[in-house]
Image (cartoon, rainbow, N blue to C red):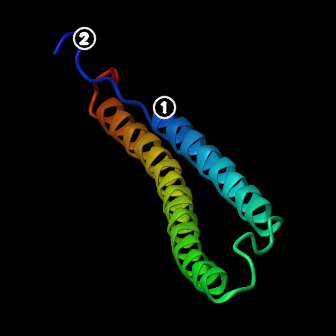
Amino acid sequence: MSGGLNLSGESIGRSGDQLTGTAERLAGEIASFRASLASYGNPFGGDDLGSAMQMIYDVISEAALESFEDNAGVLTETGGKLVEMGAEYVNVEQANQNLFTGLGGDGR
C-alpha cells in the first residue's frame, strides 16, 4: 500500500459530519418522494382488480419506504458515532503526547 494509512481525529470527525449530512439529505428525499407518491391518490381505479392492486401497492411501498427511512436513521447514528470516535481519538493522541513529553521526549 503506497503512502500508508494516515488517520486523524479531525478527519474521522469530518467524515462523521459528512455521513450525517448525507443521511439527513436522504431522509429529506425520502419524505419528498413519499409526499409525491401520496399526491397520485389511487391510480388503480375502484373496481375489484384496482382495489387489489392498490392494496398490494400500499403494502409494498410502505415496507420499502420504511426500510429506506431505517437506513437513513442508521447512517445518521453511524455518523454521530464517527464524530464521537474522532473526538476521542484527538483526546487519546493528546494524552499520549503529554505522557511522552512528561517522560522527557518531545511528543513527536
**Residue at 47% from the left image edge and 56% from the top image edge:** 78
Circle 1 residue: 11
Where 5 sits versus 28, above or below? above
Q: Give the x, y percent position of residue 54.
A: 64, 79
- First in sequence, mark 2 or 1: give its number: 2
Residue 5 % position (x, y)? 26, 24
Image quadrant where residue 43 sits? bottom right
What residue is rendered at 73% in x and 63% in y?
Answer: 37
| The image quarter in which residue 106 lies | top left
Taking 103 as reference, is 82 left or right?
A: right
Instruction: Give left or right: position of 107 versus 87.
Output: left
Instruction: Identify the residue at the far top of this view.
Output: 2
Image check: 94 left or right of 50?
Answer: left
Q: Please state which of residues 55 and 59 is positioned toward the viewer in this rendering.
A: 55
- Badge 2 vs badge 1, beta-carbon distance below 8 Å: no
Q: Nearer the viewer, residue 76 or 85?
A: 76
Q: Which amino acid does label 2 sit on?
A: Gly
The C terminus, quarter of image: top left
Figure check: 69 above or below 5 = below
State the residue at coordinates (56%, 57%).
76
Q: What element carries label 1?
A: helix
Amino acid type assigned to the residue bearing label 1 in the image? Ser
Rate crowding at label 1 as few (under 14), some (14 to 19) or many (20 or more) other CA atoms within 10 Å: some
Q: Tell me the residue at 36%/29% (across/down).
A: 7
The label on residue 3 is: 2
Q: Which residue lies furthest to the bottom in this view?
A: 48
Numbered-mark total: 2
Question: How many residues crowd around disc 2 within 10 Å: few (fewer than 14), some, or many (20 or more)?
Answer: few
The quarter of the displayed image where residue 66 is located: bottom right
**In the foreground, 41 or 19:** 41
Q: Is mark 2 on a helix, strand or loop?
A: loop
Q: Find residue 36 and report its horizontal and vertical position in percent.
A: 78, 59
